[in-house]
Amino acid sequence: MSILIVNGLMVNEDNVSEQDLFIDQGRISKIGSDLQSQIATEVIDAKGQIIMPGMIDDQVHFREPGLSHKGGLHTESRAAIAGGITSFFDMPNVKPPTVSLEALKQKFQFAANKCAGNYAFYLGATNDNPEELKRLEPGITCGIKIFMGASTGNMLVDRDDVLEDIFCNAQTVVVTHCEDTPTITANEAIYKQKYGDDIPMQFHPDIRSEEACYLSSDKAVGLAKKYGTQLHVLHLTTEKELEFFKSGDIDSKQITVEACAHHLFFSEEDYAQRGAFIKCNPAIKRKSDRDALVKAVQDRVIDIVATDHAPHTLEEKTGSYFKSAAGLPLVQYALPSLFELVHDKKLSLEQLVNVTSHNVVKRFGILNRGYLREGYAADITIVDMNKTTKDTPEAVRYKCGWSPFDGFEFRSQITTTIVNGNKVYADHKVLSDENFGERLQFKSA
């Protein structure tokens, strides 16, 4: 199949220009100002719309294998393409957890022919597997994930000697969830003594506190500096933690940092209305923290924006504070929520594309994706900033059936998503049950 996209406004490599794109056999074949003479199977008139590289989400929990009652690679990857996300990196806290090279291999085999978008999987750290982590060589997958805060099963890494070993010997990018568990546990005890099990949800950011995040980020950054580790800190939530990170081109950085779409959108003021439906770890915090994170994206301190998509069933999200699960489904509306910042002139289109596509490629060494370049894989998202998108229960595509943005009307609309040259989403519809996603490839050195 060949596709010709005409009359659109292409956003790519810090440039915005009216360009046509010709796609053939899964690749971007030609880019030019007038390609309408090209013979194509389909022509997409993108007049007045934005053409950008598909978002690459470096942090999702699609829940397979083992937790498919919450979500799955099939359902969540389709929600992702409806949200303009064409590639994703899935986390290792599944059942069984992805904490050995054999488990990683099996997960890739399990994922074959299940994904509407392109995929990679992290290898997870535990207190018991540092020798296994040393065997993960560059090029196999995206990197090593360390939960330095509370996690499921045996995936909390809280022994200093193990952390030293991992940071010293990692051959790939190390990504971290930074929260200090002893601080969180102490805060839980304080609030439980006052409120019992029925702690008001508004205190979640006080329990998963600024101090808990700061202490853990300080440790991770300190270890990376000590050993020269390539470190990427996930889902930053506080203004205070920004002191650990520098402004500049991601190419010049050993230590990088990510923010998530919901932390750039919500603040503690939203707990009153949305309660457990915005409960996540690390927590959504103060309005001043949110505003500081947005500014840090503007100033190139924050390098990447992702989702941390983590669905739970409605039953799992209801009940008292300790019974309601932490985590939000986000991939369908994350990119529209980021376009709100463009509408508000807090981000430029070029900045948005950098943090959702280009910088992910640079940080993790993804091959032949994330740019609109001739010869590159045709992973493309087309966005109309003059059409709206309303999040309603009927529109939600997640298996869990709910969204933290419920009722919000975004000022942009994902009109078309293309994965490996295949038009997979358009006119509010996923167009095929075929799985066009491919395993992402990474630089081996």
Image (cartoon, rainbow, N blue to C red):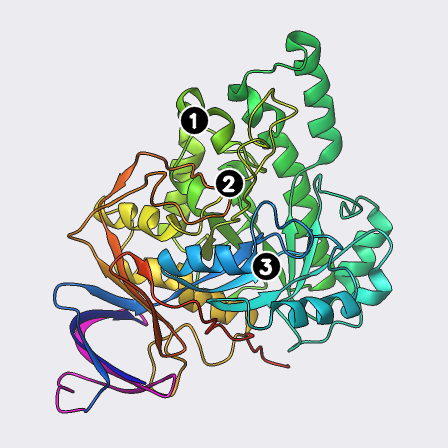
The mark nearer the N terminus, 2 or 3, is 3
**Residue under circle 3?**
90
Left or right? Give the position of 354 relative to 124.
left
Q: Secondary structure at mark 1?
A: helix
Per the picture, the main secondary structure of the magenta-coloured stretch is: strand
The mark nearer the N terminus, 3 or 1, is 3
- At a point 59% along the width and 64% down the height, the residue shown is 254
The mark nearer the N terminus, 1 or 2, is 1
**Neighbour tally class for label 1: few under 14, some 14-19, many 20 plus, Cα within 10 Å:** some
Which one is in front, 254 or 200?
Answer: 200
Image x and y of residue 405, in percent = 37, 37
Residue extending furthest front? 433
Which residues are the magenta region?
A: 13-38
**Residue under circle 2?**
328
* Label of residue 274 in the image: 1
Q: Is residue 384 visible?
A: yes
- At a point 30% along the width and 71% down the height, the residue shown is 12
**Neighbour tally class for label 2: few under 14, some 14-19, many 20 plus, Cα within 10 Å:** many
Magenta stretch encompasses residue 23: yes
Which one is in front, 264 or 68?
Answer: 68
